[in-house]
Amino acid sequence: MGRQEKSMNKKKKKRKLIAWLVIFPILLLACTFTAYGAHLYKKAEKAVNDSYKEIDGRKGKSEYREAKVDPYTDNISILFIGVDGSDARNYGDATRSDALMLATLNEKEKTVKLLSIPRDSYVYIDDVGYKTKINHAHAYGGIKSTVDTVENLLKIPVDYYVEMNFYAFMEIVDTLDGIEVEVPYKISEIDSNDKKHAIRLDPGLQTLNGEEALALARTRKQDSDIMRGQRQQEIMKAILDKATSVKSATKYSNLIDAIGSNMTTNMTFSEMKSLIEYGLSGHLNIESLTLAGTDSMIDGVYYYQLDDAALEEIKTKLSTHLELKNNVANVDTNNNYDDEENASDSEEENNY
């Protein structure tokens, strides 16, 4: 492999990491010394501080941890939660998670493992005492229930979370004057106000606005949750490419406004700054992971049945990456629970 090819691969790896940190575009400016950069730095700090929200009842750390982690010195995990809250979906605290992505970060190696969790994964939710779709956890118990469910599924701590709604995503794309992505097939979808067939896209490479990009990120009628996750990753890369271009530098102030007003997190701004080191690492390695499974229908409702053997492999891989010697929480690892289903499930959920 030539020197130029190695250099290009390193740049691609850096871009992948910052792609899932694109909600913090100001971090890209943290190493600059211009007056404009300093202004944005202060603005981002205030936005993050205003968005800070601890997980209720956690006392600052996961039950799978003996002590609170320090991201500057410890291996950590971050759960990214995209929720389906909007003006049309006035669910209050009962919003469901529409996207879940868990990142584990190894501080010494500066490596990242990124796991996409299908929204219809059939898992046990402790808050209700039975198995159902993982995206229901947020409706039953908000951030805490979602974090607890992911922890119990994977048997590792979730140290931090970042939650965002539809509007943050759309405003970011619109602030960037759209993003260029490949639409794989003809699409006819609802918009953010749930208006049917409001978004129509033809296949091919094209520039999408916020509503169109959201429709592409959410659709799954013609493929699967796994393909949906891959599309979301491609969209995030497109956002990154646009956000990091020279032409977008003057838009960072508006990007911060879009993010800050639609985000909650238990990461402080100081803790977020520790992530810069990963982006600047010359040997950054990122591994994308998926949860293998099969499509299943139970009582007329679609679920994604996780493969037990593959799940065990993922659990071991993430635990090893975090260098966990033993988990503090004494939790049943068999996950053998009754397959009782929530009576409120309906065929409508097979769409979203």
Image (cartoon, rainbow, N blue to C red):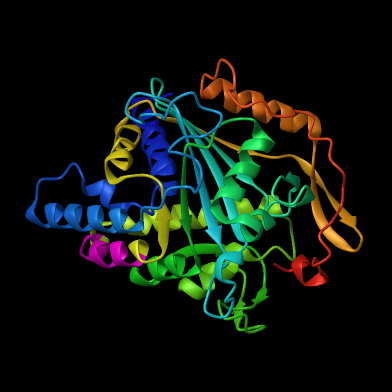
Q: Residue furthest right?
A: 299
Give residue 333's quadrant in the image: top right
Rendered residue at 27%/40% (across/down): 270
Work out whether 110 lies above or below 194: above
The structure residue drawn at horizontal position 13% and vertical position 57%, both measured from the top left corner, is 39
The majority secondary structure of the magenta stretch comes to helix
Asked if residue 156 lies left or right of residue 59, the reply is right
124 sits left or right of 244 in the view: right
Which residue is rendered at x = 29% and y = 61% of the image? 256
The image shows a total of numbered marks equal to 0
State the extent of the magenta-drawn residues as a range. 249-258
Q: Nearer the viewer, residue 48 or 254?
A: 48
Q: Is residue 139 above or below residue 274?
A: below
User: Where does the C terminus fall, quadrant-wise?
Assistant: bottom right
Provide residue 321's location: percent of width, then percent of height.
53, 23
x and y, in percent, of residue 173 in the image: 41, 67
Q: Between 348 and 250, which is closer to the camera in this rendering? A: 348
Asked whether residue 326 is drawn in magenta, I would say: no
List x then y, in percent, for residue 167.
45, 70
Q: Measured along the vertical axis of the image, is residue 297 above or below residue 169? A: above
The image quarter containing residue 184 is: bottom right
The extreme left residue here reads 35
Q: Residue at x 56, y 65 (%)?
A: 93
Towards the viewer: 187 or 31: 31
Q: Quadrant of the N terminus?
A: top left
Q: Nearer the viewer, residue 247 or 19?
A: 19
User: Taking 149 as reference, is 247 left or right?
Assistant: left
- Quick one: which residue is furthest to the top in this view? 325
> Residue 217, how many percent across, how many down?
58, 62
Q: Quadrant of residue 288?
A: top right
